[in-house]
Image: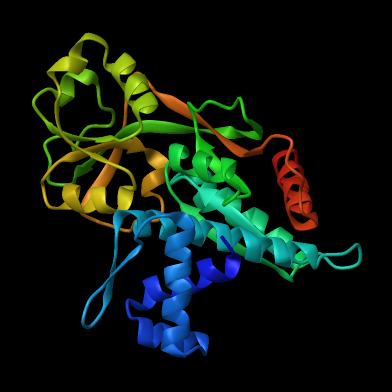
Amino acid sequence: MEFRSLYYFLTVAREENITRAAEKLHLTQPTLSRQLMLLEDSVGTQLIIRGKRKIHLTEAGMLLRSRAEEILNIVQKTEKDLLSDSNQIIGEIMIGMAECMAAHKLLPEILSAFTKEFPSVTYDFYTGNADLIKARIENGVIDIGILLEPVDMEKFDFIRLPQKEKWGIIVNTDSILATKEYIQAIDLKGIPLINTKRAVVQNEIANWFKNTYDDLNFIATYNLISNAISLVANHIGNVITIEGSLFNHDNKDVKFIPFEPALESGVVFAWKKQRIFSPALSKFIETIYHRINE
């Protein structure tokens, strides 16, 4: 399987039309169709269903599209990294971010200092939970990520941040809970709740609730807080989350209330063990160490 074939396939998948894709690639339609058939022969399965007006991807085609995007992103990033030399730091740093205070406050401070020193470096940001970011770091799609603990760090090197994230609940300002300074487990009995999707964090939360956990009314789970906040604003449920997840969301209809007794999680910058750093990534990690130890 050649990179060129993946690029052709990805262009067709994005355009959803072989004719438009051929024009974008500066190829004739028969040439592009032949390349696609050769690709299908090489992988041993059908990737594209050809319709009258547009193409559709098979399940195998959707899988290949996802993998092809990751592969080509890595190739493009590697090409940029190889341009760096001792006199000029250039390239791209791919950063994964949890929705937490470190991503909203500390990371911009680090980027500001780093960009002033190395203005030719560019960035690619990805927001997700720790499980999603970890998988992308392992696959080489992300260079470094901000992860919310608990998380298995066996395959990663990391810098633990001094700040902790407080757990609590986001409620509607009209809720009977909104007047409380702290939330205790008994306060949430019978209240519709929206919980984090990460199983390891669900276990941490279950331990905090102790014997009242099985009596709670969980109506949904979430991955990113953005969609969950709108559910709170519309009186559909109340979100269990960390305080930092609400930092960049200016919504007057909701508020965060911390748990009592306090439940806190650590935050780390993490990268894959025994990986070879690009000059840009090496300098970026140095900048993080300097900022943390100021």
Q: Position of residue 215 (x, y in %)?
A: 13, 17
User: Is residue 236 rendered to the left or right of residue 114?
Assistant: left
Q: Residue at x 16, y 25 (%)?
A: 188
Q: In which quarter of the image is the N terminus?
A: bottom right
User: Is residue 13 rendered to the left or right of residue 236?
Assistant: right
Is 84 or 252 nearer to us in this picture? 84
Residue 3 seen in the figure: yes
Residue 10 seen in the figure: no
The colour scheme is rainbow
Q: How many marks?
A: 0
Q: Position of residue 21 (x, y in %)?
A: 42, 83
Q: Residue at x 41, y 78 (%)?
A: 33
Q: Residue at x 69, y 34 (%)?
A: 273
The answer to whether 238 is drawn above or below residue 21 in the figure is: above
The answer to whether 264 is drawn above or below residue 102 in the figure is: above
Q: Position of residue 76 (x, y in %)?
A: 64, 66
The answer to whether 230 is drawn above or below residue 57 in the figure is: above
Residue farthest along the top direction in this orientation: 211
**Quarter holding residue 54:** bottom left
Q: In which quarter of the image is the C terminus?
A: top right
**Quarter holding residue 55:** bottom left
Is 66 or 152 nearer to us in this picture? 66
Residue farthest along the left direction in this orientation: 190
